[in-house]
Image (cartoon, rainbow, N blue to C red):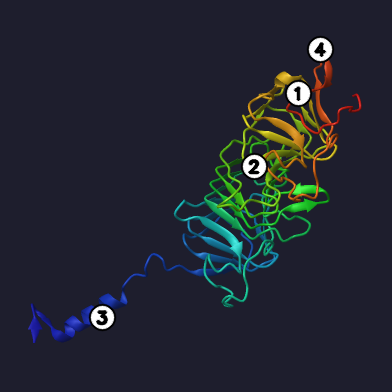
Amino acid sequence: MKLHGLSISSLIILLIGITSCEPIGENQYDTITVSSDINSPTTWGKGNTYIIDKDNLYVYADLTIEAGVTIKIISGGNIIIKSNGNIIANGTNANPIVFTSTKDDSHGGDINKDGDNTIPAAGDWGCINLNGSQNSTFSYCQFLYGGRDNANPATVDVSSEATASFTNCVFAHNSGGLLNNIYVGALNASNASKNTTVTDCQFYGNKVPITINAEMNIDNSNSFSNEGTANVCNGIFVAGSNVNRDISWLEDEVAFVVTASDLEIGRNTKLTLGNNVVIKFAEHSSMTVMSGEGCLVNHDGPGVFFTSLKDDEHKGDTNGDGNETIPSEADWTGIYLDNWKSTRGYADWTNILYNDPHPQVK
């Protein structure tokens, strides 16, 4: 029997051929184990899951990570940029790039095949160390459950004056913390280039969310909580003791925290504060404004305060100790106006709280 010139047997063969060549659906991706360093330009393809099965994965060339990729890193594992390496990780709102723990079954599936026997937690893996990289970019990336190394509890370390941009990224459930009395954020940009940018990012569930180089600009676009979950030490911790270029600190959800014994705003250099900005000072810390109060722009703006790190009434419990400490007089030194053109002395503005009323004269 024939149908329009085809026999029944020919039709069956044709149908079998069509069925066997059916393309794989767009949502069926591969799980790929990575156990060798990145020595040449490499792309990790859209939607795949990559398992970093190596204590230290060194990146010597550009590593491009496409939208929708999940990267799972073994216990204690690190990704470290070397020589000319960079990471270019540009996800989208619908398809973010996720860096997470091998125990995290909600991203990339149950790759350790243990069902619910293990659950992810802060410190499951180590850190992404940008190590001087000058062209790394991260947009719509999620960094989850990192910061294991006791020598560096950061999840992303913008070290060795690296320059990087972070846009629409999430840092959640990571470590960070105090290391030799120094605050280290889940995003540690304390030794970053001053041109590093952090915009429209969200930080929650971390011990310490972010540490910045004192010369970095911070706008008011970042968020420090999610559905009621904040960070243990919920603030922007400032590292370094010199500011020698004009910068702006505009974030008003959490306080900036000065930890240096003296943060110096250089001559003819301006630090501009947004309305409702609070700067808290660690014990015995201070600020010197070399060219006088005019260079601490908006120091008397609405809602602007300079206060103790122990002061929970302004921007909350920034040192994360509950009621264990309360602010008191002389918690920190004060703001010294080293106006080399005229009068010198400590500021006595009404929005300065818990400073030393009788500081040692400089």
Using the image, tell me which numbered label, if any, was put on residue 163.
2
Q: Say which quarter of the image contains residue 338.
A: top right
Which residue type carries mark 1? Answer: Trp
Q: Is residue 328 left or right of residue 207?
A: right
Q: Which mark is residue 349?
A: 1
For the point 38% across and 64% down, the residue is 26
Q: Which residue is mark 3?
A: 16
| On-image quarter of the C terminus | top right
Eye-nearest disc, 4 or 3: 4
Earlier-in-chain disc, 2 versus 3: 3
- The local secondary structure at tag 4 comes to loop
Please report the residue visible at 80 percent of the width from the left and 13 percent of the height from the top.
341
Give the Cα distance between marks 2 and 1.
Answer: 37 Å
**Residue 276 drawn at (x, y percent):** 63, 32
Q: Residue furthest top?
A: 342
Crowding around mark 3 (Cα neighbors within 10 Å: few <14, some 14 to 19, many 20+) is few
First in sequence: mark 2 vs mark 4:
2
* SS label for mark 2: loop
